[in-house]
Image (cartoon, helix red, strand yellow):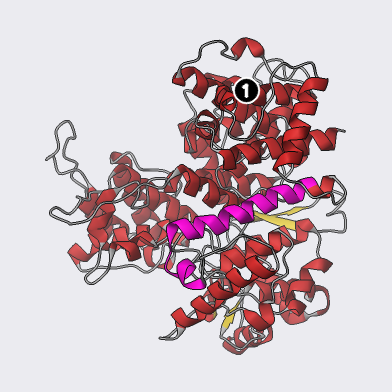
Amino acid sequence: MFIPGSEGLEGGTELKDHTAARMTEKLSAEEVEEIREGFQRIDVNSDGSISAAELGNVFREVGFVMPAYKVREILKKLDRDKDSRISFHEFTALFLELKDDQVAQSFKKALNKKEGIVAIRGTSEISSAGTQHSISEQERIAFANYINSSLEKDLDCRHVLPFDPNTDALFDAVADGILLCKLINFSVPDTIDERTINKKKLTAFTTQENLNLALNSASAIGCQVVNIGAQDLKEGKPHLVLGLLWQIIKIGLFADIKLSCNEALAALLEEGESLEELMKLSPEELLLRWANFHLKKVGMSISNFSGDIKDSTAYFHLLQQIAPDGSKEDVPRVEIDMTGLYEKDLQRRAGCMLLQAERLGCRQFVTATDVVSGNAKLNMAFVATLFNKHPALTKPENQDWTLESETREERTFRNWMNSLGVKPHVHHIYGDLQDAMVILQLYEKIKVPVEWDNRVNLPPFKGGGGHLKKIENCNYAVELGKSKAGFSLVGIGGQDLFEGNETLTLALVWQLMRRYTLNVLEDLGHGEVAGDDLIIKWVNKTLTEAGKTSSIKSFKDKVISTSIPVLDLIDAVQPNSVNFELVKTGSLSDEDKLDNAKYAISMARKIGTKVYALPEDLVEVNPKMVMTIFACLMGRGMRRA
């Protein structure tokens, strides 16, 4: 069984043996969340493991007296596979030994003393035994300021905005779901049809609908919300609220930091590097590459957004390089004042740097303290803001290549995988699947056992034989599909997955997603095998019993393009939920159909279905995605029954 780290651990989290995996069975959901938070705070470069240097930094940063031999003792104790790094599994082992082990106790004492961390004792039934969750005050302040500025003109949020970032008002502000829905649309425009948000005279029921809409929409854009419920948001549980907000904000910040959306990123190609290799880089890696592209002009480079930026030197030079030079029409020249670089006090120097960032309209996410303390998450968000507003890149000319944007199908599959918490986080679907680690995790999600110990080569894949180990994993993934999952994989081999064959890779991913969707129905139906015919029969029976006149013959039925059968079914599953005055009928234009589809998708999410399909899938009657919509609504209807 694969136990992932947490959202934000983008690197290759190592997979350990079943003994380690079983450890999590002894932990509550909130304890697992605590472990994830602790892991993230130490793993500053987000590579999915903790190095000796990162471990030592924890104690140095909090001023905790710890001799070098004690640090080595902790590392030795936790590093069970002797690879000089602490994996998430090994980190989990520490927390299970806390009560009886003095070495582990001293480690946690240092972790909780880390600057800006506030421990919050759990209050739910799960955490009544004394679980504590730690939140970063800096993150709370940064996210509050970001939301205040991003949504300040939204009249629907004026009942909660602006809020004081120095208080806990942020946690109360998410309770009715409106702010969350608005923030999701700010990060990924048009995700939620605004007509479906309940805004006036909210009751407990309409508030629940808003939170359903927010959580299911967050899942649809790739957020992992498995351990977050509407009640958690109503209660404003700080660690869960901050975790969800960061995922939503990060998706928006990173939206344009990929080659398929921003061709000027091709300027970052290094000598001998192919476009395909550049496309495989994560947004974090591209941000670092971008910063070094500009810093190289002054003979500098950085390797992270934590320790390397603490003295603000790199930031001063980066601002100077990206500031508008006046060559573009309507963009005035900005001359960066570099005198602050000579300020000896690092706190004041960072303050001077942020004043210059403000002149570029980029003073977001970090304070001078965040820079000096090297808060990796907030500094990465700051650099992403710099990139989004002032990339200062020019697409290379006379290049013989064309870039294809991510297709809707690819985006839907990617968001589905990420919402399930696979590691590493999927950015480029073909590059991130080529070692089959994500595919193998998806097999476990559909209840197909994976022999992690005997058949899977675990990352990191080093040396010349690394690609062979990846191919072996891909071969095993295809073998599982054929022999255990019963998939139709004619003509698909492991080499195809490794090489990123688009058609064949998507064929496998679709069958994984389809099985995942149908498994939900089988669970609800006490093991009855679900298929297309069963779903269509249920849809029509439910529509008839509710007195609706619409019906479907198949998932290719052209009437689906109007979205009326979907809206009728939603209203049948949850009576009087659909406002049919908003539904276009009669002879419909493409614009009318899209309008209906947007309303239908958001309404489906609002009544509690986790729909990943997009409105365009309904308008174009994409049978694959149409099936998932009806299957999810069937699952919702069966739960009601």
Q: Could you say where residue 286 lies in the image, as x and y percent from the top left?
A: 36, 59
Q: In this view, does 164 lie to the left or right of 523?
A: left
The quadrant the N terminus occupies is: bottom right
Q: Is residue 451 magenta?
A: no
**Hey, which quadrant is residue 585 in on the image?**
top right
Image point 53% across, 74% down: which residue? 54
* Rendered view: 244 above or below 158: below
Q: Does the magenta stretch include residue 500?
A: yes
Image point 74% across, 38% down: which residue? 535
Image point 37% across, 69% down: which residue? 303
Q: Mark 1 points at which residue?
A: 196
| Residue 353 visible in the displayed image | yes
Magenta stretch? 494-521
**Hey, which quadrant is residue 26 in on the image?**
bottom right
* Rendered view: 14 above or below 563: below
Image point 53% across, 35% down: which residue? 617
In the image shown, does 242 or 466 lie closer to the viewer?
466
The quadrant the C terminus occupies is: top right
In the image shown, does 490 or 70 lie closer to the viewer?
490
In the image shown, does 503 or 469 lie closer to the viewer?
503
**Magenta region, main secondary structure:** helix
Q: Could you say where residue 3 lies in the image, as x and y percent from the top left?
A: 68, 67
Q: Could you say where residue 513 lies in the image, as x and y percent from the top left?
A: 63, 52
Q: In this view, does 495 lie to the left or right of 527?
A: left
In the image shown, does 281 or 477 lie closer to the viewer?
477
Helix, strand or loop status at disc 1:
helix
